[in-house]
Image: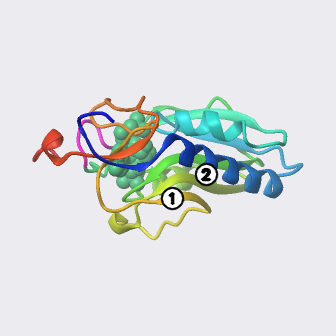
Amino acid sequence: MHEDIREVLFSQSQIQEKVTELGQRLTEDYKDLNPLCICVLKGAAPFMSDLVRAIDTHLEMDYMAVSSYGNSTKSSGVVRIIKDLDTTVEGRHVIVVEDIIDSGLTLNYLLDLLRRRNAASVKVVTLLDKPGRRTTGLKPDYCGFEVPDEFVVGYGLDYAEKYRNLPYIGILKKEIYGDAG
Ligand SMILES: O=P(O)(O)OC[C@H]1O[C@H](OP(=O)(O)OP(=O)(O)O)[C@H](O)[C@@H]1O
Ligand code: HPA
Ligand SMILES: [Mg+2]
């Protein structure tokens, strides 16, 4: 285990099992709908790449980069689009793929944008949900695991751009970010 991690919450094999289960549910729900899976960069990239391989129906992939955390453990509340989609979402069945929903501010902003662009439907799949910190009424349509109100890293999730490549998800030691959160 990495020395900056206090506790491993989900191992590589637990994550893989959950991704397979979510993929099976999405396969059933999106048969013949040719969904557009939108990965919210950068955190959701590992999840998206495993998830699409667990979905057994035609789908398309696109990427959007937004950021509200910068180098902090608390959302700035201001969501910035760093990269927009290449695809038009009008009339498409959209699946937004997230690594974590925390305050819900990022997704609130994105869902509003996608609906205004006239997607046929917009649903959210998130690997992690941290409902204890929600400041919006947002609930995911598909969720892997609930996590406690702690800052978690690994499998795409970062603190100051580090730890994204850990194959498991763990709680970051408080002394690593100190009062910077
Ligand atoms: O529900 P919220 O409080 O908005 O937090 C969740 C969002 O924050 C993180 O992204 P971040 O802005 O850190 O960008 P990153 O994916 O590039 O790390 C995470 O990947 C989610 O997109
Ligand atoms: O707990 C978290 N870890 C990493 N990134 C995050 N973005 C929101 N919450 C988190
Ligand atoms: Mg981040």
The answer to whether residue 157 shows anywhere in this view is yes
| 113 drawn magenta | no
Secondary structure under tag 2 reads: helix
Could you say which is closer to the camera, residue 35 or residue 6? 6
Q: Residue at 32% across / 30% down in the picture?
A: 161
Q: Main secondary structure of the magenta part?
A: loop
Tell me which segment is drawn in magenta: 66-73
Which residue is nearer to you in this view: 67 or 139? 139
Residue 135 figure quarter: bottom left
Which secondary structure lies at badge 1? strand
Give the vertical position of 6 relative to 49 (above or below). below
Tell me, what colour scheme is on the image? rainbow
Say few, some or many: other residues with alpha carbon within 10 Å of mark 2 (under 14 / 14 to 19 / 20 or more): some
Q: What distance separates the C-alpha of mark 1 from that of mark 2?
A: 8 Å
Mark 1, residues whose alpha carbon is within 10 Å: few (<14), some, or many (≥20)? Answer: some
Q: Could you say where residue 152 lies in the image, as x and y percent from the top left?
A: 34, 48
Q: Earlier in the sequence, mark 1 or mark 2?
A: 2
Residue underneath mark 2: 18
